[in-house]
Image (spheres, helix red, strand yellow):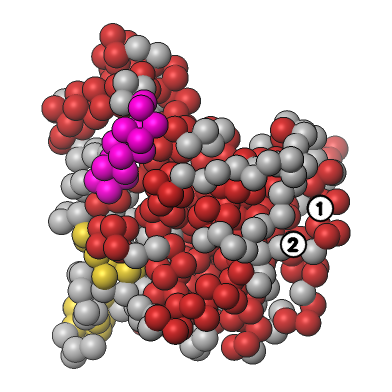
Amino acid sequence: MTDKKAYLSIDGETIDLPILTGTLGPDVIDVQGLTAKGFFTFDPGFVSTASCESEITFIDGEKGILLHRGYPIDQLAMKSDYLEVSYLLLYGELPSQEDKALFETKIKNHTMLHEQLNDFFTGFRRDAHPMAIMCGVVGALSAFYHDSLDISNAEHREISAIRLIAKMPTIAAMSYRYSTGLPFMYPDNTLDYSSNFLHMMYSTPCEQKEISPTLARAMDRIFILHADHEQNASTSTVRLAGSTGANPFACIASGIAALWGPSHGGANEAVLDMLAEIGDVKHIDKFIARAKDKNDPFRLMGFGHRVYKNFDPRAKVMKQTADEVLAELGLEDDPLLKIAKRLEQIALEDDYFVQKKLYPNVDFYSGIILKALNIPTNMFTVIFATGRTVGWLAHWHEMISSPYRIGRPRQLYTGAAQRDYVETDKR
Ligand code: SDX
């Protein structure tokens, strides 16, 4: 921190506001003193607001930089694996070989669900959206761990994080299997994290699905690329829920709910729906025109970002992975991929998108890979939530393990001034 100050002059009075400097990124103006002076700040959508101090992830939107505990996302995606990145996000350092093996064992020991949780699924219609199921089941998990919900206890916080990271792939796969009428598959702990997920998605009690290492690697890379992203909408939701002292399962369920929206994690499902609606490269111009039309709510899904005003570094890795997976599967001529690549090329040349700096984001290519992995479109956000769970937990733990206050934004009130009640017969 420095002793730099900003000076706000209001009606002849000057208010000194401290300027705080972090390791990387813009300085922040500490406005906490404004309330005592009778003012709030006003920043709908929190475009210019730093809600907290954090050491977990750094994003530079202009330079397309994404660091997890200082490590660039492209290096982690190409050299690490999801559980190692999870350890890094949670504990702040890359694990030793011994610590990594211990962490993997801890996760493996918690991949199963309490058998009674199976009954939760049967309460849903078979055609329930898997995000609705995941949201309900994760929130319900707190009912099974009354012995470890004291958030002031570091051991309770850690075992809750382990349980959630371990069980999300199991819940995700069960949310899919329930819609097919196929029996749930138990985890196979001889498999790595992502292979185990694909096993629970596609094996049956009659035959063990042979999991391609390339496809499992692609799945693991998708989990890595979705693991964390600073103070995005769902992470901010988890922090706000956590600031009330709510248990970690309830907080993660709130993050899943926030992620579901098509402007956020629901975009990957919306990208595939959009590509299918475009249907053919020759229709692209019509959709580009709609995306530019102020009177048309249609937006080009998978493009644009609140922070990235240049390329999204995750999209670059995702595009490379899409090419690898489709080559492995002999799907280079996938029609949706052709539309996606042509759409990207046109959008990046079109003045509207160039001026508004609307580049492909993480969701643009992830759907292509997931479709190639035979993941149903309505499972895409479930997979995003599975990967993002460790990011949510890292931010929740970072907040809870140091002094914090309940989050409680204020407002600019523009409603009616005080007035007296009017009896019904006088209205
Ligand atoms: C994720 O925050 C995160 O980190 C999120 C995320 C994560 O990892 O957690 O990165 C994951 O959510 C990625 C984003 C996925 N969403 C989409 O792909 C949906 C399509 N994108 C848009 O809805 C939009 O770009 C947002 C929501 C992503 C960003 O919205 P902003 O920052 O509030 O920007 P905006 O809506 O104010 O748009 C600025 C301008 C507007 O035009 P004007 O009013 O200035 O004339 O750009 C236009 C918008 O109309 N615009 C688009 C557009 N995105 C923005 N126009 C057409 N197509 C688009 N996709």
Amino acid type, label 2: Leu
Q: What residue do we see at 44% from left, 32% from top?
A: 372
* Highlighted range, magenta: 315-331
The residue labelled by disc 2 is 113
Q: Residue 62 falls in which quadrant of the image? A: bottom left
Give the image location of residue 403, x and y in percent. Answer: 50, 88
Q: Residue 168 falls in which quadrant of the image? A: bottom right
Which image quadrant: the N terminus? bottom left
Whether residue 192 is in magenta: the answer is no
Q: What residue do we see at 46% from left, 67% from top?
A: 83
Chief secondary structure of the magenta span? Answer: helix
The first of marks 2 and 1 along the sequence is: 2
Whether residue 329 is in magenta: the answer is yes
Which secondary structure, mark 2? Answer: loop
Which image quadrant: the C terminus? top right
Cα separation between marks 2 and 1: 8 Å
Q: Badge 1: few (under 14), some or many (20 or more) residues near its Cα, within 10 Å?
A: some
* Rendered view: 365 above or below 42: above
Q: What residue do we see at 79% from left, 47% from top?
A: 121
Depth check, front residue: 273 or 81: 81
Which secondary structure, mark 1? Answer: helix
* Rendered view: 95 above or below 349: below
* Rendered view: 118 above or below 157: above
Give the image location of residue 311, x and y in percent. Answer: 21, 46
Give the image location of residue 361, x and y in percent. Answer: 31, 43
Q: Is residue 377 visible?
A: yes
Q: Confirm or deny contact between disc 2 and disc 1 (CB under 8 A).
A: yes
Amino acid type, label 1: Asn
Q: Is residue 126 left or right of residue 116?
A: left
Q: Is residue 67 left or right of residue 111?
A: left
Q: Is residue 361 visible?
A: no
The residue labelled by disc 1 is 118
